[in-house]
Each structure stands twice: as structure tokens, then as C-alpha cells.
Image (spheres, rainbow, N blue to C red):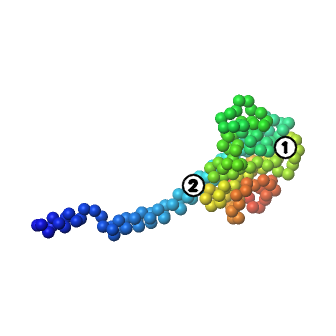
């Protein structure tokens, strides 16, 4: 009986082998789950980028309607407010058509994507063309595809095999064979 009591006293915790097995199982589960989480994050960032490009298309049309002598905006800043939460009176330099986060997404990424607006090849007034581009801030971490749109408001994407992190700024390239229409 005394021998049994000594054995029971020794068996109070887990053995080293049992703990190593539990840690190994946790690591295996993490190795399976982490790539799926990264893919889900990339998909969410790309979805946000598509939505932002659509918002920018709508903002460009609204801007061109509100300021017909200027035409389309050629900068993100002109479509948004001058500062976060500060839009008293819209003007052609700060039309307040998009939020400050998107208006400053040329320098600071919004949901892992950088954005740019260019007026294509023309420098006329009123501006009659534009190119909206969106590219992942860090390829294969924040996104894998680039997006663009021109004044026809059709959203296009590039599979981005080269891993570019520069938003498209050419109308010819956006409508070329590299970019496909997003369904």
C-alpha cells in the first residue's frame, strides 16, 4: 500500500514526452492554418482594392460633372479632403468625394494596396482621360494582382507574374493584352 502511495505522488504532472507530443501537434496545426490565413488576407485586400477602384471611377465621373472646365481629376488628393475629417467646402483641389485614407493611398497603402491616378497621355484642359491603378504594397504578402480602370469604368486585372508593386499609369497598357476584364 505504501508503494502505491509513492507511485501516485510521483504522477502529478505530464511527462516530457507527453508535452513534446502536444507541442508537435500544435505546430502541425499551425503549419496547416497559417498559409490559409495568409491567402484569406490577400483575398480580402484584393477585394478592398477592387472596391476602391470602383469608388475612384465613380468619384472621377462626379468630379468631371462638378468641374466641367477642369475635366477629370489627375490626382487622388483632388478627389478627397485636404486632411482627415476636414472638408468644409468642396473645391476642385479638394472635392471631398472620397475619404482621406483612399485620397492618401498613393503614399500610404490602404488595405495593403497603393493607388495612383494619371491623366493618361493627354495634358489638355479639360482633362478627358484618366487611368486608375492599384498594386500590392508587398507582392505575395498584401496581394498578388494589380488592377486598373480608365474612363470607360471597366475594371481590369493583371495576374502580376512579374510581382510589380507599381500601380498602372498607362491607358494603353490597361486596355492591352496584359490586363483582363474583371468579371
**Looking at the image, which residue is at 65% across and 35% down?**
85
The residue identified by callout 2 is 41
Q: Can residue 39 be seen in this view?
A: yes
> Residue 127 got which mark?
1
11 sits left or right of 123 in the view? left
How many tags in the picture? 2
Residues 117 and 50: in front is 117
Q: What's the residue at 79%, 36% (across, down)? A: 92
The answer, for residue 175, to whether it is visible in the render is: no
Other-residue count near label 1 (Cα within 10 Å), few / some / many at <14 / 14–19 / ≥20? some
Ranked by sequence position, the earlier of labels 1 and 2 is 2
Tell me residue 78's x, y (percent).
76, 40
Binning the other alpha carbons within 10 Å of mark 2 as few (below 14), some (14 to 19) or many (20 upward) gives some
Which quarter of the figure is the C terminus placed in?
bottom right
Q: Give 159 or 14, whichever is nearer the viewer.
A: 14
Q: Is disc 2 placed on a helix, strand or loop? A: helix
Q: How far apart are marks 1 and 2 (CA)?
A: 37 Å
Q: In this view, does 8 lie to the left or right of 118?
A: left
- What is the x, y in percent for residue 71? 83, 40
Give residue 5's quadrant in the image. Answer: bottom left
Say the numbered circle drawn on residue 45.
Answer: none
For the point 66% across and 55% down, the residue is 137
- The outermost residue toward the top is 88
Locate residue 110, reporting x and y percent.
65, 48
Q: Residue at x 70, y 49 (%)?
A: 107
Specify whether 115 is left or right of 44: right
Amino acid at each position: 500500500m505504501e508503494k502505491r502511495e509513492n507511485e501516485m505522488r510521483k504522477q502529478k504532472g505530464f511527462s516530457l514526452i507527453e508535452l513534446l507530443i502536444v507541442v508537435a501537434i500544435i505546430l502541425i496545426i499551425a503549419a496547416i492554418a497559417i498559409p490559409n490565413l495568409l491567402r484569406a488576407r490577400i483575398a480580402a485586400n484584393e477585394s478592398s482594392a477592387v472596391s476602391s477602384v470602383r469608388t475612384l471611377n465613380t468619384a472621377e465621373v462626379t468630379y468631371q460633372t462638378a468641374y466641367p472646365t477642369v475635366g477629370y481629376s489627375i490626382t487622388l488628393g483632388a478627389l478627397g479632403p485636404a486632411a482627415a475629417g476636414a472638408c468644409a467646402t468642396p473645391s476642385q483641389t479638394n472635392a471631398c468625394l472620397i475619404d482621406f485614407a483612399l485620397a492618401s493611398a498613393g503614399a500610404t497603402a490602404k488595405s495593403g494596396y497603393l493607388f495612383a491616378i494619371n491623366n493618361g497621355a493627354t495634358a489638355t484642359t479639360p482633362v478627358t482621360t484618366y487611368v486608375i491603378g492599384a498594386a500590392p504594397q508587398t507582392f505575395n504578402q498584401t496581394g498578388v494582382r494589380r488592377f486598373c480602370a480608365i474612363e470607360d469604368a471597366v475594371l481590369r486585372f493583371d495576374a502580376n507574374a512579374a510581382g510589380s508593386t507599381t500601380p498602372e499609369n498607362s491607358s494603353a497598357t490597361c486596355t492591352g493584352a496584359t490586363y483582363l476584364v474583371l468579371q
